[in-house]
Image: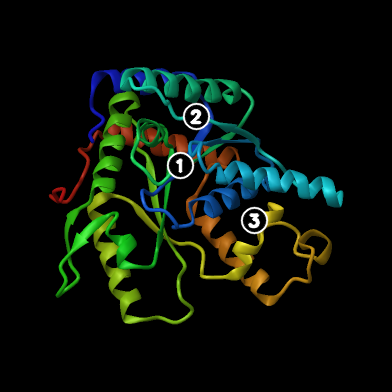
Amino acid sequence: MRIESQAFANAVGRARAIRSSHVIVVANEKGGSGKTTSAMHVVVALLKAGQKVATIDLDSRQKSLTRYITNRKNWAKKTGIPLELPEPFVVDRGNTRSVDDNEAAEFAGFAAAITAVEHTHDFVVIDTPATDSYLMRLAHAMADTLITPLNDSFIDFDVLASIDPENFEVTGTSHYSEMVRDARRQRRLVEDVDTDWVVIRNRLGQLETRNGRNIAEGLAALSRRMSFRLADGFSERVVYREMFPRGLTVLDTLDERTLGMKPTPSHYVAHDEVVKFIATLRLPLDERGKRRAAARAEWFRSSRQPFRDGGLTAD
């Protein structure tokens, strides 16, 4: 499904014209990759850095990010601990039989959420469902930073590209990679600015394996062709799953009062790996960061180099 129609370009242009916040989109068309966990840790990291943050949940059926935030609010009230909170929004999917009516309603909901925070918030973090949709494509075309969590598995790798079963070399891009490439092209048509795409490897094992090395090599080759950056994300740790009911993250105070339990060494190791992950994103957290982001955007506008796709074709 391509997104190069004039109607879609006009919608993206109108949406971007009414926003000034830095938009972070966390997305992957495969479920279970850690999108919501990644999004929540990014949100809390920004809040703890003194930024005003809004969230937009595009998964109006599951609402995992919104429920995570609600759990956090309830836990803060129950314990009396002053936990930082973002301003949450949910955009509903259209449910009529008319595609045009659904897209119009979805755009109106999306634009209303952006309009509500454009002059008051520094960052907008958007969590997405594991499906291709109008809202999904609109979010990608709006992204200043796109984060794609990927489990360390060739099943998840298949979301980005196909590989040769004998030598594990990349042989073609997938539908999701093509959608991201189209969204980035649309972004350049509207604003002449590129999206910083970061693919993060989640659920990394504690020991290096041949499978892990093959995946790492394949991602490195694909990153050069699709122009994304690679980062290590979240290892396979129980502590991440335990924190959802209380809305906590490993960036919160690691003590018994906050956690409701004594912290373990795994909590501290997880904290350090999340701090490293956040640093890899290179978000404009201060005036210096904002100037660097502006300089990168200006360089892109002045260079006007064509987008490099490495000659890969979709499956």
* SS state under label 1: loop
Choose between 174 and 115: the one closer to the eye.
174
Classify mark 1: residues with Cα within 10 Å, few (<14), some (14-19) or many (20+). Answer: many
- Residue in the picture at 47% in, 67% down: 203
The label nearer to you, 2 versus 3, is 2
* Residue that badge 3 annotates: 244
Measure the C-alpha gap from mark 2 to mark 1. 12 Å
Q: Residue furthest right?
A: 80
- Residue in the picture at 53% in, 20% down: 112
Measure the C-alpha gap from mark 2 to mark 3. 23 Å
Asked if the residues shown at circle 2 and circle 1 are in contact, with their CB atoms under 8 angstroms apart, the answer is no
User: Any mark on residue 250, and which?
Assistant: none
* Residue that badge 2 annotates: 92
Q: Is residue 130 left or right of residue 74?
A: left
Classify mark 3: residues with Cα within 10 Å, few (<14), some (14-19) or many (20+). Answer: many
Q: Residue furthest front?
A: 97
First reached walking from the N terminus: tag 3 or tag 1: 1
Residue type, numbered disc 2: Asp
Q: Is residue 30 left or right of residue 272?
A: left
Residue type, numbered disc 1: Thr
Classify mark 2: residues with Cα within 10 Å, few (<14), some (14-19) or many (20+). Answer: some
Residue 7: give x, y in percent of width and height.
Answer: 28, 18
* Residue that badge 1 annotates: 128
First reached walking from the N terminus: tag 2 or tag 1: 2
